[in-house]
Image: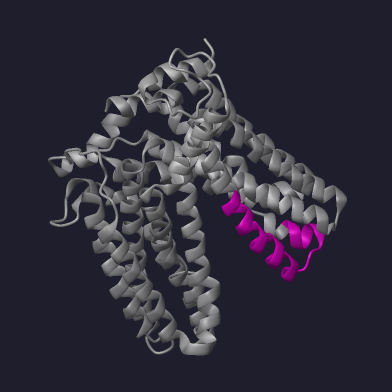
Amino acid sequence: MHPRTNATKSRGVSHLPPCLPFDKTGGPREYSYSAMARNLSDYLQVFRSRRIGVMVLAGFSSGLPLALTGGTLQAWMTVAGVDLRTIGVFALAGIPYTVKFLWSPLMDRFVPPWLGRRRGWMFLTQAALLLLISAMAVGNPEAAPWALGITALLVAFASASQDIVIDAYRTDVLHEPERGLGAAVFVTGYRIAMLVSGALALILSERIGWRNTYLLMASLMGVAMVTTVFAPEPELRVTPPKTLQEAVIGPLKDFFSRRAAGGLLLLIVLYKLGDAYAGTLTTAFLIRGVGFSPTEVGTINKGLGLISLIVGAMFGGTLMVRLGLYRALMIFGILQAASNLSFMVLSWMGKSYAMLVFTVAFENGCGGMGTAAFVALLMAMCDHRYTATQYALLSSLAALGRIFVAPTSGYVVESVGWAVFFFLTAVAALPGLWMLWRFRGEIVGLSGREERS
């Protein structure tokens, strides 16, 4: 049977979006101008959703603290004259982001006394971030660097905790057709926040000083808290785990009781592998391999790249309303692999500005589309009882491939050259695409599973 017919039956015809080109019998839908108008209305309905609007500010709140304990803090310490060894040690402040799954069961098990299980934790973590970032503002990196470092570690812990609950809230509150676009909008807010707490904060520091800059950043968390208070509550009511033991063991038992659980975990590791592998040395390639200046790379690769990523994520998220999860993952995954080959062509052509612009726009646009679909896949895999724990574990697992293959990139380039390296990054995407095709039935069935849960 054709995969699209399977998808129709597993989802249940009563839940089919009117924009799909099938009628209730599974046959082709007759198109007319009125049908096209209804299709357009379906897309616009997703954009008008209050839940989608909340994702922008949720993404902003999630992305804001990251640079304040990373690049911006490093800049502050450098300007203050702190020695490089101390600055290097301060990179350990980012550890909570990599081990956040360790305390995620607590956020599934315990429910704050106000605003519900998800929004209550969001409000608490955002209030903690407001206070802790304000505490960083009154720190002195020259006189008391370690006190500032401990505060930065606490900010990272609160930020990682906020990420846990926002990921869970996004998964619980968004309806299935909204997930792709919701993920794209979230990424947009996240990237804007990184610009604000990164580039903008550095500019402001020279005008209003570091203390006022950090106080301004802390005040933005107040906006996030207001958003959380007025954000919609997830419509699906679930019973939280009754014990902490259930909150720890339940997510694992639930996931591994599913058909092809191991294969789906391997898919998560492999799907973005080629994209991540190419990204490890992109900047080095453009500067050393092709000969562009750091200014040109910063302007085109970082500036145009950010815009292309956001546009790609928004475009991909919108297309997912019509394509569905499996087809979006497959199409966007193929485009991700193909976009790596554009770097191979650039290495052959040499220093070509036109090819640089095309390569950066194409690669980041396709990466944004793939990210929107991949985040939607992670959300679809979560059980609403254990969303915080399962999403934290799955997202950590997704980073494993990048962590293990990234160190090999320099050795590969030195052995075979830039062109072959980028060809190999495209090849590295093929196992993920094969796994996607191999488990297409299970992925299509994720929609039907949610409707039954």
Q: Position of residue 382 (x, y in %)?
A: 34, 36
Q: Which residues are magenta?
A: 285-311
Q: Is residue 388 above or below residue 158?
A: above
Q: Quadrant of the C terminus?
A: top left
Tell me where residue 177 sits by quadrant.
top left
* Magenta residue check for 294: yes
Q: Position of residue 19 (x, y in %)?
A: 49, 30
Q: Residue furthest top?
A: 1
Direction from residue 85 to residue 153 in the image, left or right: left
Q: Position of residue 341 (x, y in %)?
A: 74, 42
At a point 75% along the width and 51% down the height, the residue shown is 358
Q: Main secondary structure of the magenta part?
A: helix
Residue closer to the observer: 23 or 70: 23
Residue closer to the observer: 34 or 295: 34
Direction from residue 416 to residue 172 in the image, left or right: left
Q: Residue furthest front?
A: 34
At a point 30% along the width and 46% down the height, the residue shown is 388
* Magenta residue check for 288: yes
Q: Can residue 12 be seen at all in this image of the molecule?
A: no
Tell me where residue 130 sits by quadrant.
bottom left
Tell me where residue 144 sits by quadrant.
bottom left
Q: Is residue 49 above or below residue 331?
A: below
Q: Is residue 356 above or below residue 451?
A: below
At a point 35% along the width and 62% down the height, the residue shown is 159
Q: Position of residue 239 (x, y in %)?
A: 16, 38
Q: Can residue 289 be seen at all in this image of the molecule?
A: yes
Q: Is residue 383 above or below residue 263?
A: below
